[in-house]
Amino acid sequence: METADARIEESAKEKYLHFEALAEIFTYIAIVGGFFFSFLPFQFTFDQRSLHISIAIIAGLSVAWFRLLPKKFSGETKNFVFALLTIFFIEVVVHFTRGSQSAVIFLFYVASITTAASMTMMKTVAVVVLATFFIGLEAFLGSADPSLGSKSISMGFLHTWGLLLTTSYGWLIFQEEKAAKGREEEAKMEKVEAVDQVKNEFVFIISNKLKEPIGFLQEYLKDLAQEAKNFKAEQNDILQKTQENSDRLASLVGDLSDLSRLESGKLNLEIKDVDLGQVIASTMSDFTFPAHEKNIKLIYEPPKNQLIVQADSGRLHEVIANLVDNAIKYSYPGKEVKVSLEKKEGMVVVEVQDQGFGIPQEAQKHLFEKFYRVDRGDRAEPKGTGLGLFITKQLVERQGGKIWFESEVDQGTSFKFTIKI
C-alpha cells in the first residue's frame, strides 16, 4: 500500500498535469482565435503581417512546449515559466492591437487567474505585477497625451484594477478549494490508516493463532518420518510433500506475523552487543541439508577475531537466513553460495553471493516491494510469499543499516547489507 507521502506527491503531480492540459487547450484556442480575429474589420489599424508571424512563432513554441518536452519535467516550476511566457506573448499581441485599448487585454486576466489556480502567492503576485507593468507600459506608449486623465492611461488603470481584483478573488477561491481537498484527502488517509490498523490486528491474531497448530503438525510429521523406513515409496513421497508444504505454511505464517508487527509498530528490537561471526556460522549450519540437496557448496570464512556489532541477534539471524535461503533457491546446481564480511567506516558489510539465475532488469526496481515475486518465465517458478525481502529490508533499516544488491542475468546476484559496529 502506498505511503501518505507517495499519495500526496502523486496528487500534486496530477494537479500540475491537469493544469498543463488545460493550459494547452487554452493556448491553442487563443492562437486560433487570435488568427481569425485578425481578419475582422476593426476600426483601428495594426500590423497584420507582424501579428501573423508572431502567432506562427507562438504556435510552434507551444507544440514544442506541450508535446516535445518530457512529462517528467511537469511541475510547479514548468507551469510558472509557462505563465511568464504567456504574459510575454500576450504583450506581443496587445502591442500589435493598439495597447491597453485592445479587446485581447482580457488574456492578461486569464493568464493571471490560471496562475493563481496553481501557484503559490508569491508567484501569483509576480505574474500580476508583470502583467500590470505591461498594461501600464502599453497605456503610456499608446497615448498621445501622457497625462493621468487621458483615455489610454485611464483604461490602463481600469484594467490594472480589474486584474488585481479578479486575480485576488480567484486566488482566494482556489486556496479555499485546495484547503477543502486537503481536508478531504486527510480524512481519506485517516480512514485508510484505520482500515490498515484493523487489517494488521487481524493478521497478527490469525498468524499467532496458527503458529501453535502448525508447530504440532511439523512435530507429528517429524515423528512420522522416523517410521518412514516401513513405508512404501508412494507413502514416503506423500510424507515428503506434506513436510514441504507444512514448512511452507509455517514460513508464510511467520512472514505474516512479522509483517503485521512491522506495520503496526509492535515489532520490538533488542539492540545489544552481538558476535556477528557466531550468528553467521550458526545460520549457515541451518542450510547444510538444503545446500547438499542441490549440490551447492556453502562458503564462509569466519573472522579471525571476535567481531561485535550492534544488533538484535534473532532478527539478524532472520536477515542472513532469508538471504542465504534465496541464494540457494535461485542458484544453479553444483555452484557456490558465499558469505563474506568487510569492515567499512564504522560498519560491517555482509555480502551473500550466489551463482544463479540473476534478477531480470525489469524486476530489480520492484524487488523490495511487498508481495512482489520475480517472474523468470519458464526458468524458475516464483517461490515464497513475496514478503521475505520486504521484511529483510525493514529489519536491516530498523537496526541502523541499509541493504542493496547487484545482479546480472545468468551470472548471479550479490546482496549486501550493513550493520553498525
Image (cartoon, grey):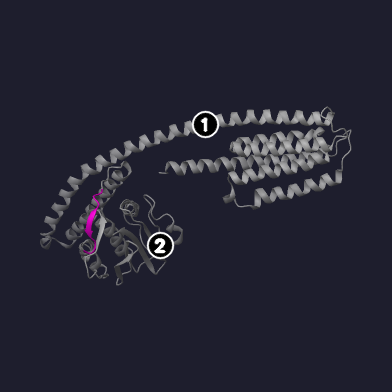
The single residue placed furthest to the bottom in the displayed view is 334
Q: Which amino acid does label 1 sit on?
A: Ala
Quarter of the image for the N terminus: give it.
top left
x and y percent of residue 407 in the render? Answer: 40, 65
x and y percent of residue 115 in the render? Answer: 64, 38
Q: How many numbered marks does the figure carry?
A: 2
Q: Nearer the viewer, residue 308 or 384?
A: 308
Label 2 Cα neighbours within 10 Å, binned few <14 / some 14-19 / many ≥20:
many
Q: In which quarter of the image is residue 144?
A: top right
- Which residue sits at x=56%, y=40%? 15
Q: In which quarter of the image is residue 75?
A: top right
- Which residue sits at x=17%, y=52%? 218
Question: Is 22 on the left or on the right of 367, as rendered?
Answer: right
Q: Mark 1 points at which residue?
A: 179
x and y percent of residue 274 in the render? Answer: 22, 58
Question: Is 214 on the left or on the right of 101, as rendered?
Answer: left
Label 1 Cα neighbours within 10 Å, binned few <14 / some 14-19 / many ≥20:
few
**Residues in magenta, as a range:** 269-277
Q: Compared with residue 138, is residue 64 higher up or lower down, i.e. above or below?
A: below
- Which residue sits at x=30%, y=69%? 338
Secondary element at image label 2: loop
Secondary element at image label 1: helix
Q: Which of 403 and 28 is in front in this view?
A: 403
Kindly indicate whether the residue at mark 1 contacts the one at mark 2 (C-beta within 8 angstroms). Answer: no
Q: Mark 2 points at which residue?
A: 359
Circle nearer the N terminus (2, 1): 1
Quarter of the image for the C terminus: give it.
bottom left
Residue 140 magenta-highlighted:
no
Question: Is 83 on the left or on the right of 376, as rendered?
Answer: right
Q: Quadrant of residue 341?
A: bottom left
Residue 111 visible, this orientation: no
Residue 271 magenta-highlighted:
yes
